[in-house]
Image (cartoon, rainbow, N blue to C red):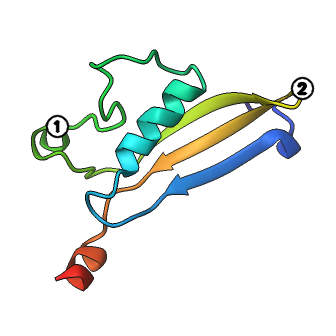
Amino acid sequence: MADYPAEMIRNFCIIAHIDHGKSTLADRLLEFTGTILRSVENKQVLDKLQVERERGITVKAQTASLFHKFKNNTYLLNLVDTPVSMFCILLSD
């Protein structure tokens, strides 16, 4: 991937308030690009820590690289699934 042309790379992150579907959106993007298979077991695949699984929240930012074909071009998409910061939680109270 280090040799991938810069004009074909897109970096993005998913940022939103708690329980607004950040990890669910990340899962759907992983499925849509064929990075993972669509399955009922594939829920919050980027949430790897036990506490994330138990509480249903993202604690640690995770990254994933996906390839997506669009108009005869294949783009490398670098995704960052971000946790909610304490600042956002304090603002919502």
**Residue at (33, 58) in percent of width and height:** 20
Q: Mark 1 or mark 2, which is nearer the start of the sequence?
A: 1
Is disc 2 in contact with disc 1, using a CB cutoff of under 8 Å?
A: no
In the picture shown, does residue 7 fall above or below 90? above
**Residue at (56, 27) in percent of width and height:** 32
Which image quadrant for residue 1?
A: top right
Say if residue 3 shows up in the picture.
no
Which image quadrant for residue 46?
A: top left
Q: Which amino acid does the dot numbered 2 rest on?
A: Asn
Say if residue 68 shows up in the picture.
yes
On-image quarter of the C terminus: bottom left
Dot 1: within a 10 Å radius of its alpha carbon, few (fewer than 14), some, or many (20 or more) residues?
A: some
In x, y percent, where is residue 11? 66, 50
**Residue at (53, 35) in percent of width and height:** 29
In the picture shown, does residue 67 fall above or below 34? below
Q: Is residue 19 left or right of residue 65?
A: left
In x, y percent, where is residue 61? 38, 50
How far is mark 2 from mark 1, CA to CA? 38 Å
Residue highlighted by disc 2 = 72
Residue highlighted by disc 1 = 53
State the SS at label 1: helix
Q: Nearer the viewer, residue 19 or 7?
A: 19
Q: Which amino acid does the dot numbered 1 rest on?
A: Arg
**Residue at (30, 76) in percent of width and height:** 88
Q: Nearer the viewer, residue 24 or 63?
A: 24
